[in-house]
Amino acid sequence: MSRELDTKELLLKLSSIPGPSGFEDEVLEEVEKIMKDLSDECFRTPMGSLVCVKRGNGPKIGFFAHADQIAFLVVKVYEDGFLRLSGIGGWDPKVIASQKVTVHTRHGKFRGVVGFMPPHLQTTEESKRVPDYDHLFVDVSMNPDWQKIGIGDLVTIDVQGFEKSGTVFAPALDNRASCVAIIKAAELITKLETKAQVYYVFSTREEIGGPGAKSAAYASELEYGVVIDVTHGDEDLPGFPKIKMGEGPAIAVGPVTNRAFVEHIRDVAGKFNVKFQIEPIPGRSGTDTDDVQLTRIGVKTALVSIPLKYMHNPYEKVVIKDVEDTAKLLAFSTLGLE
Amino acid sequence: MLKFLRELTELKGVSGFEDDVREFIKEKIKDKVDEVFVDRMGNLIALKKGSGGGKRILLDAHMDEVGFMVTNINEDGTLSFSPVGGVDPRVVIGKKVIVGKDVEGIIGYKAIHIQRDGYLNAPKYHELKIDIGAKSKAEAERSVKIGDQVTFSTIYEEVSDFVIAKALDDRCGCSILMDLIYSELTIPHDVYFAFTVQEETGLRGPAILAEQLQADVAIAVETTTSGDDPELEKQLWSTHLGDGPAITFMHSGYVVSKDIFDKLVEVAKKHGIPFQYKMRTVGGTNARRYALTGIPAGVVSVPARYIHSPVSVIKKSDYENTVRLLKAFLEEF
């Protein structure tokens, strides 16, 4: 290995590559380029997930991060160069207006602008409500060959990430931040004496409730699985502890996780002095953990979440140190497993 | 043509903060005009003298753009802000903004997963915050202060015959005036090029110009609404991109002097310059202020989509035909 991978650069790099659910290839190719040097073998599952393996003769443990992001699909093309969209994954309609977008087609990429009626032309009634998909529209008329855009083409919002005082603001940090945490964990593991056989899984189609992670877990025949995702940082949720930005990853406790394995991770965090927080999840988690747990004869699961603010906004926010602490927690959790 | 538009739109200049725009324009035009000065409000006025015996024509474009001002620095390090000019709160979420000279921040919104009812209600400004990554009030205060201007950060882009940018209203007009200053004008008239301040906060800059310049006529060179998109039926469109400069017969608070309006139309027709009438009478321009202070005024505008948002769109052919129309008007007046 040459110099250590820079977490900030990785976050900005991976978040800058569009990878809507089902179209993660470009992201995964970039990840594979990095992971080739940090693992013994990489392969793709039939669902498209990227699995990289560090061989060992100890227990098999998998780290899972979904690589896809929410996006849009073209559902209507008007004659004069305007489109209507539908969301792939859960968008807030409030964040879509007045964005520059890229339309991805098999004929290449096209510029689009989500238009918005200027105040001068609005009616009072309209101004009280945020336009939903029936009223949001994309102007692509500036492209001379916009007629090549078809129903079903993908649309992503075009914003450029940046870093400020240890914080990264960027698109798709849900869940590229977790992809970066796994990469950094893999880098750390190359320096650790661990017997575990580690599977680094960058999975597809999570935002559409999809099968990317489960099928990778199936292929890998794991005993342990840690899903890395993001959780709402710095938000007050009545009855729940506030997960704070900058205070380390949140370790989930609840029925979708294996109690003994979670205890092990907490012990490791204590032993190696890694900051963490506890996130109670009384039922299903809404992450890939729910599916991974039920794979084959069952997988002993844990869920580790990076605090993230403004989830599913065009700019999401993470603290770089939280990503690095997550990587440490993952790497050390491979030690001392029976 | 259009050679200054990129820089003009990327400059930051909310109403009352036109300094950078003014300096840029002044620097570029000072050797091309006979006189240039800045008045007490901050309006930049340049005079290009005619060959003599003509009239005094004033061309106006406002330098300011709509944006925001920091109104409070909160305990958690976020910034509260209010609009300066008309910015719909529905276009600001999820945008990167620049606070003051160069402090980057974003306007975020609580994740959709944890919002309660009413997620389609228009947000209110007091609910929105700018996040500059500061973890405390003290940290934020090291880089920003109450009263700082806040602007969108859109990068100028040309796609075929179109321009996508912020602040086209009215840097587009400023750019047109600069193009006219750079062009050969052989006319008897003296032309005052007035780059004005604070249009978006109530047509304030030009209010003191009549007292300073004895102009016979003023033309507000503007960037106006179009509405030519799927959300409006065609009869409600204001203008249509590609149909040429929009000539206004009436708008909020002002019926354009008939002789000026007629002259603009006559000149366009005579020179075969495509033009359109602005079909909605909403919105106002500095023409109203000139008329109120004793200078009869007209309005010529470049049609634009999505003005007062971070991404507005014009068609270059409309821009070019606006320059042609104004040049012909100056020559025929």
Image (spheres, coloured by chain):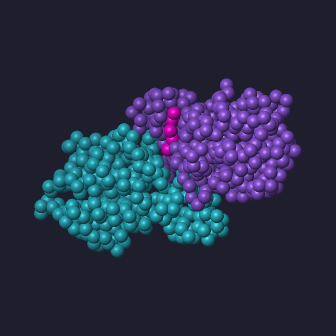
Q: Residue at x 54, y 30 (%)?
A: A153
Residue at the far bottom in the pictured view: B40
Q: Residue at x 41, y 35 (%)?
A: A143
Chain letter tied to purple: A
What is the count of numbered marks?
0
Q: Residue at x 52, y 44 (%)?
A: A158
Q: Which portion, as a residue range, is magenta?
A: A100-104
Chain letter tied to cyan: B
Main SS type for the magenta part? strand
Q: Is residue B268 left or right of residue A220?
A: left
Q: Is residue A263 left or right of residue B51?
A: right
Q: Residue at x 32, y 72 (%)?
A: B39
Residue at the far front in the pictured view: A193
- Whether residue A29 appears in magenta in the rendering, the answer is no
Residue at the far top in the pictured view: A46
Vertical order, A12 against B53 (above or below): above
Q: Position of residue A192 (x, y in %)?
A: 72, 46
Look at the image and tell me whether residue B45 can be seen. Answer: yes
Q: Is residue A1 left or right of residue B261?
A: right
Q: Position of residue A151 (x, y in %)?
A: 54, 28
Q: Looking at the image, which is closer to me, B220 or B143?
A: B143
Q: Position of residue B267 (x, y in %)?
A: 22, 47
Q: Is residue B230 left or right of residue A68?
A: left
Q: Quadrant of the C terminus of chain B?
A: bottom left
Q: Looking at the image, which is closer to me, B136 or A235?
A: B136
Q: Looking at the image, which is closer to me, A41 or A146?
A: A41
Residue A284: quadrant of the picture: top right
Q: Position of residue A179 (x, y in %)?
A: 65, 42
Q: Looking at the image, which is closer to me, B186 or A240?
A: A240
Residue at the far right in the pictured view: A260
Look at the image and tell me whether residue A304 can be seen. Answer: no
